[in-house]
């Protein structure tokens, strides 16, 4: 039987563990996430793969031969985060203590050492398993070499490579030469992605044959290919793994890679210092030997259930037996499988439940094909489930409950008893991280499940869930419910351990229910009005197009960056502000805005792009998004997508309508009341009021308490003039300072905003802080606190993590410091509007009104009220919104009324 060599791409896993794990720290505040992730991965590898030989390979310090070939190699990579750099030495110690030989060879990369060892092993008929997350190493796969990705569970043999990349392993370098590698700054062919690369290689057989036939490839892709061909020899050298490294003095033969005895003394020291409680108990057998640590050590992954009992319910006896379990369980994890990701269109294919770790079921109800005969009838299943599903006293746990609530509503069931939501638990704990179920299972449970793509495929060949055979669907769905329950057991205590996080989590649960109502309500849009606006925008764009031709001296395609670059920087010789990654002069919005200060054509182009985006995104698209069954547009609100706690609107995005322009405001005129009137209620200058509260600045608080125009009051303070003596320019400058400072704007930004010198801008800021010393003290103390603890908090306890404030340097750290100032303001504003949403909906329900909440946009709520309820709602809204919390300055909410959204504003 063949022997096995297990090679670990240590450098790949260093970064992946650092970014995948939570911000773990020991009792002394030292970062431990990467260390925990790497050690956990190695422990799993040893458990899953029995190997006679092994090694963990890291990149050595200093340059490699690739840097000599191409000085720009990896130049885009930021420096290693400080929190990761601090863990390198203990990671190396831990790996060696676990018995792994460790290699780091100067002048080459870890990939090259892995390739060399794999080739030597093949010469001795030893099979190699490479554990990595690096796609470049797919080129090594052959009958002797297999890749495994411990973090995702993916295994790549030769058919696996073809299935993933569309090309065999011996064509991976060709494939990479076409797509390039943005991470390592290796250029490919512009605008050629994985699909095109695989298609070309399949069609031509190799990149060499592709080069021979390049003249026959038409269009932009063909032009880009021909332009890239001169770079191919260098690109090939950069991307090809070197398999003949000189390992003299490090490894003479594969026998040198025999694992060493475990160093328990070193492991005990490391586990104690870094707070790995479970591992320490396992190692020492001493249940009392538990290191002291803070709450974040509790992220350590729990043991997987010893047995797995996943059942597929296909007869009524099994159904009744399972429902008896569900009735007795204090909390049931519930999940749905559907026909669509669009929650208002999705129909139920099946549902899964879990009552204990490792114990779950799947009830299929709408699978197509041969499996259809093995299912219980959907209507009867739902009829029997309905009392339990709608029972508010039966506690249910879901992951993204809003989606499942919509799905059941589509089936005529009003889901009750939603007690917990693991997506929201994860979000309040780490709003800067992904909240997908698989990501969380990997991060908190240390396990990976079957992915949707594994089951249904991806791209054009993806099938619907109702086409998946029930046996496979059953395991996947039951696993989702099981993972949800296990995640809850890890996440819920972590949320409950912090009073502020618990308060925010309970708020988010309430908001989830309100958003479900708002999304189902939808908003009426006037399709005819949008059609008229589209025609008008088209005419205005034609006029701008003609104006651009006149300024350029010739016609050209305004939507072509290449032609635009030729006109601006070739024909007109305008200064090049910035270049793209391919070396061409950039024509993005920021560049055009800068050029527009001195030249008329860039300004025309900006206006054209603005109108074009408005037309394509709103006036053309919105009529097509009207739901045929409701006659209304239903946006989707992502509750766990924005770090600060704000909601994100999509399909359509109602938050990005450019209302500072006349054309943008016209779009809001198409949002109309189907009956009665629209009411728009929003908080006045909410973030400045929050600044006055958190900074406890007496002058700011006095101005708000007196009901003064805050920008005029600031101008009076900064410029030393009476309130009635403030002129328009002074008020404009004060407004820029007020908003600029809470967004972390510095001297350069303020000078640019106001069109003044940096010295003048500095003088404004100095005067501002002299008159508002509390604001200066707040900013200094917040930066300091953020650096110390790695996060800031809102007034109500929402935690906003800032990993780069300690783990980065230069501009990235400065950006994190600016975010530390602004995040509490934005986050507190998000908390307030969410509290207001809950308060308003509770009032509407209690009063049994017909008025409906139909939109939430930033600090604004939009409602649709019948004429008979209009005055009642108009009077109640400011009171409800302002009474949700008490700050050191009064909250003010203003209400407008109109037949359309723009009028109501």
Image (cartoon, grey):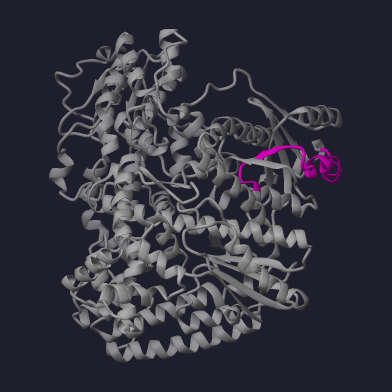
**Vertical placement of 269 versus 796: above or below?**
above
**Vertical placement of 584 versus 640: above or below?**
below
Image quarter where the C terminus lies is bottom right
Residue 351: say if magenta: no
**Vertical placement of 301 versus 397: above or below?**
above
The x, y position of residue 780, in whole percent, is 28, 52
Q: Nearer the viewer, residue 418 or 879?
A: 879
The x, y position of residue 464, in whole percent, is 65, 48
**Vertical placement of 695 versus 688: above or below?**
above
The x, y position of residue 335, in whole percent, is 67, 40
The quarter of the picture where residue 727 lies is bottom left
Q: Nearer the viewer, residue 889 or 98?
A: 889
130 left or right of 471 in image: left
Q: Nearer the viewer, residue 9 or 688?
A: 688
769 left or right of 710 in image: left
Observer able to see residue 301: yes
User: What are the residue bounds of the magenta stretch?
Assistant: 376-401
The quarter of the picture where residue 280 lies is top left
Image quarter where the N terminus lies is top left
The quarter of the picture where residue 524 lies is bottom right
The x, y position of residue 85, in whole percent, is 25, 34
Q: Nearer the viewer, residue 564 or 380?
A: 380
Q: Residue at x 63, y 72 (%)?
A: 624
Numbered marks: total: 0
Q: Residue at x 66, y 76 (%)?
A: 678
768 left or right of 516 in image: left
888 left or right of 256 in image: right
Observer able to see residue 563: no
């Amino acid at each position: 039987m063949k022997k096995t060599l297990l090679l670990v791409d240590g450098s790949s896993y260093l970064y992946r563990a650092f970014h995948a794990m939570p911000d773990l720290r020991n009792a002394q505040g030292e970062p431990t996430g990467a260390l925990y992730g790497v050690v956990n991965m190695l422990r799993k590898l040893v458990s899953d793969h029995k190997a006679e030989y092994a090694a963990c390979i890291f990149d050595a310090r200093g340059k490699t031969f690739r840097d000599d070939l191409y000085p720009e190699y990896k130049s885009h990579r930021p420096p290693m985060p400080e929190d990761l750099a601090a863990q390198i030495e203990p990671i190396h110690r831990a790996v060696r203590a676990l018995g792994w030989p460790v290699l780091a060879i100067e002048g080459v990369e870890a990939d090259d050492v892995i390739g060399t060892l794999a080739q030597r092993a093949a010469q001795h008929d030893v099979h190699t398993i490479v554990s990595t997350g690096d796609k470049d190493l797919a080129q090594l796969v052959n009958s002797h070499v297999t890749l495994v990705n411990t973090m995702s569970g993916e295994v790549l043999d030769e058919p696996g490579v073809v299935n993933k990349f569309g090309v065999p392993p011996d064509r991976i370098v060709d494939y990479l030469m076409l797509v390039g590698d943005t991470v390592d700054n290796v250029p490919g062919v512009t605008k050629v992605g994985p699909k095109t690369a695989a298609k070309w290689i399949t069609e031509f057989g190799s990149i060499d044959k592709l080069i021979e036939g390049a003249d026959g490839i038409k269009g932009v892709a063909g032009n880009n290919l021909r332009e890239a061909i001169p770079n191919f020899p260098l690109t090939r050298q950069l991307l090809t793994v070197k398999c003949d490294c000189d390992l003299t003095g490090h490894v003479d033969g594969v026998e040198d890679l025999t694992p060493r005895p475990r160093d328990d003394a070193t492991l005990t020291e490391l586990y104690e210092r870094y707070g790995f409680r479970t591992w320490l108990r396992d190692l020492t057998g001493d249940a009392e030997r538990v290191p002291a640590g803070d709450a974040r050590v509790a992220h350590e992954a729990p043991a997987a259930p010893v047995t797995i009992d996943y059942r597929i319910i296909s007869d009524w006896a099994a159904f009744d037996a399972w429902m008896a379990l569900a009735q007795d369980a204090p909390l049931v994890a519930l999940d749905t499988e559907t026909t669509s990701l669009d929650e208002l269109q999705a129909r139920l294919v099946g549902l899964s439940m879990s009552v204990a770790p490792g114990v779950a079921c799947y009830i299929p109800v709408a699978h197509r094909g041969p499996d259809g005969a093995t299912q219980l009838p959907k209507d009867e299943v739902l009829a029997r489930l309905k009392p339990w599903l709608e029972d508010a006293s039966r506690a249910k746990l879901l992951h993204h409950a809003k989606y499942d609530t919509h799905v059941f509503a589509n089936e005529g069931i009003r889901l009750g008893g939603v007690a917990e939501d693991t997506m929201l638990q994860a979000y309040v704990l780490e709003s800067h991280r992904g909240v997908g179920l698989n990501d969380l299972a990997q991060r908190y449970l240390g396990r990976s499940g079957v992915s949707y793509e594994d089951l249904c495929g991806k791209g054009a060949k993806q099938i619907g869930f109702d086409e998946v055979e029930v046996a496979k669907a059953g395991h996947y769905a039951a696993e989702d419910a099981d993972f949800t329950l296990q995640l809850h057991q890890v996440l819920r205590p972590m949320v409950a351990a912090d009073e502020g996080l618990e308060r925010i989590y309970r708020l988010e649960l309430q908001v989830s229910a309100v958003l479900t109502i708002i999304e189902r309500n939808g908003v009426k849009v006037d399709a005819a009005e949008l059609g008229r606006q589209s025609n008008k925008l088209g005419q205005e764009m034609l006029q701008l197009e003609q104006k651009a031709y006149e300024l350029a001296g010739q016609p050209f395609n305004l939507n072509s960056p290449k032609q635009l670059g030729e006109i601006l920087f070739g024909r007109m010789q305008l200064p090049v502000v910035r270049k793209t990654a391919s070396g061409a002069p950039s024509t993005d919005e920021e560049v055009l805005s800068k050029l527009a200060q001195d030249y008329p054509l860039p300004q025309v182009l900006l206006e054209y792009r603005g109108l074009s985006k408005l037309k394509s995104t709103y006036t053309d698209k919105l009529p097509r998004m009207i739901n045929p069954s409701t006659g209304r547009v239903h946006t989707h609100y992502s509750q766990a997508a924005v770090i600060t706690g704000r909601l994100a609107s999509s399909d359509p995005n109602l938050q990005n309508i450019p209302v500072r322009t006349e054309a943008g405001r016209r779009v809001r005129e198409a949002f109309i009341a189907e009956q009665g009137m629209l009411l728009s209620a929003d908080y006045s200058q909410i973030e400045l009021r929050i600044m006055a509260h958190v900074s406890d600045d007496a002058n700011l608080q006095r101005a708000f308490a007196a009901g003064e125009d805050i920008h005029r009051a600031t101008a009076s303070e900064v410029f030393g003039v009476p309130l009635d003596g403030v002129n328009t320019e002074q008020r404009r400058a004060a407004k820029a300072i007020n908003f600029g400072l809470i967004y972390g704007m510095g001297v350069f930004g303020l000078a640019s905003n106001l069109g003044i010198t940096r010295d003048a801008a500095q003088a404004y800021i100095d005067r501002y802080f002299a008159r508002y010393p509390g604001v200066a003290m707040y900013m200094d103390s917040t930066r300091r606190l953020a650096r110390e603890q790695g996060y800031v908090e809102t007034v109500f306890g929402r935690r906003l993590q800032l990993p780069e404030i300690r783990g980065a340097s230069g501009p990235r750290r400065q950006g994190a410091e600016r975010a530390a100032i602004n995040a509490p303001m934005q986050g507190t504003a998000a908390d307030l509007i969410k509290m207001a949403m809950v308060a308003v909906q509770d009032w509407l329900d209690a009063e049994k009104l017909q008025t409906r909440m139909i939109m939430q946009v930033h600090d604004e709520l939009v409602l649709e009220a019948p004429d008979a309820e209009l005055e009642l709602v108009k009077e109640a809204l400011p009171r409800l919104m302002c009474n949700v919390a008490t700050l050191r300055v009064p909250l003010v909410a203003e209400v407008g009324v109109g037949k359309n959204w723009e009028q109501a504003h």
